[in-house]
Amino acid sequence: MDTMLTWNTTHVSHLLSRVLFGYSKSDLERAMGYGNFQDLLDLAILKDIPNPSPPDTWVDLTPEQAQLDRNLAGPWFVQLTKWWYGRMFNESLSMQEKMVLFLHNHFSNERQKVNYPQYVYKQNQLFRTYAFGDFKQLVKDISIDPSMLIYLDGNNSRGTSPNENYAREVMELFTLGLGNYTENDIKQAARVFSGWQVKGLVAVFDATRWYREATVTVLGKSAKFDNNSLIDHIFTQTAAAEFICRKIYKEFVYYKADEVFVKKMAVVLRQNNFVLKPLLKFLFTSEEFYKPEIMAAKIKSPTELIVGSAKQLELKNPDLQNWYDMAIILQMQLFQPPNVAGWEGQRDWISSTTYSYRSGFTDSLLSGKRYNGATVTGKLDPIAFARLSSNAEKPKEFVEEMVKLFIRFPLTESRKAFLLEVLLDGTIAANWSTYTPNADARVNKFLKAMMRLPEYQLA
């Protein structure tokens, strides 16, 4: 670990803003209570936790056409999404759900094609099992995961006329990246991945649907490969560790990869035989991660914005239907990425349309009304929230504290002066009190203005 790394709220706030879906004042205080990066990471952020219980009993029902005909799948998908939002909202100091979303985007599957939420739930739990675990084993498991077999057409792939979709994506998007394999590697690998079929809730291997050749040649090696031995072989390629580390770097550090640092990460990943936890620990204790230019340089994804704003406001019972509907408008419907490459992220998240809807969403948590006038339940009690701060009766200090908690990007003095003016709303600082008749509206107005700032979109 870097001895130079200073333990302070600036660094810890930055760490939490990247490994969690936002955090509250009490989350930050709890994190600071660990006293050093080692313990915070080992005992909280990267600690293994058991998989949660399922959203409902339908997860064990054998998928059948009747469920689609009776329109049961749609409501189940909504329930599954809200269940996952609940996991994110109540994540405490664990990075597990952030990694589950990272893996969901990496091994992108669209619910629209998979059709049955049972399969999608199963895959989501698979990501949870491997959130900090053996990435190589995860790729082996995903190659026979029912959702993936359906999504990339492995379900109907026969050795005699193999479907190449999964073989292509496993190399291009999941393990190696473009330019590190040939078309022939894909054709041969597709034979190896054939033979698996979804039956009920699982995948079974049918040898009669597999390839007959004595050997196939993939990435320069000839063997009678099966899924596992082929994936082991793919991971011997130099490109594999770097490809995965680059993806992690771009998600958690900065959208443009630093290739020198990616190579350092790749060494750690290989040394640990592709287990993610030591890599994540290396990353979050490296000086690279805490460079000033890295801080507040990530545009929040809609999921980070939605969950994070509710966490910062410490809402008791957020309106998950509001989250579900707004996520679609903000172009990040969980389980429905745009294509097999997943969400592009960063600048793609903000357009003239989505930017105003983002403000509409944060407004709704304070006003109890959506942009279209529909009611939102579980809105903020502004006075109770303000009084969580010891500065509630000191307007200037209160603004300073809230800005520090809500905004990662350093605000100018004039921006802060503007926010103080909004809070005071015509009264003078000396007369400010949360006990005056209009205080709730003033606190709301201030929070609304702060969460509408462009700087609020950065993590």
Image (cartoon, rainbow, N blue to C red):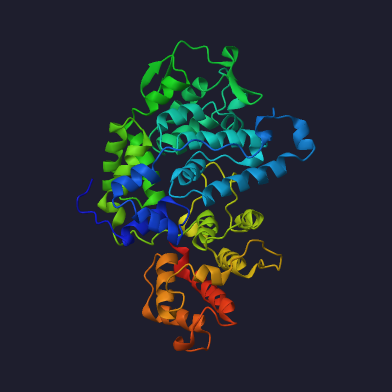
Where on the picture, by quarter, is residue 391? Answer: bottom left
Which x, y percent locates residue 71?
77, 40
Is the residue 325 above or below the residue 156 in the image? below
* Quarter placement of the C terminus: bottom left
Residue 255 shows up from this direction: no
- Across and down, in percent, residue 118 comes to 64, 34
Drawn side of residue 305 relative to residue 65, left or right: left
Q: Is residue 35 left or right of residue 64?
A: left
Residue occupying the far right of the picture: 70
Position in image of residue 217 (x %, y %):
41, 20
Compared with 397, 104 (above or below) is: above
Image quarter in which the N terminus is found: top left
Residue lying at 39% horizontally and 40% vertically, measured from the top left: 47
Residue at 52 percent across and 11 percent down: it is 212
Q: Nearer the viewer, residue 344 or 130?
A: 130
Q: Position of residue 128 (x, y in %)?
A: 49, 37
In this view, 265 is above or below 197: below
Residue toward you, 20 or 158: 20
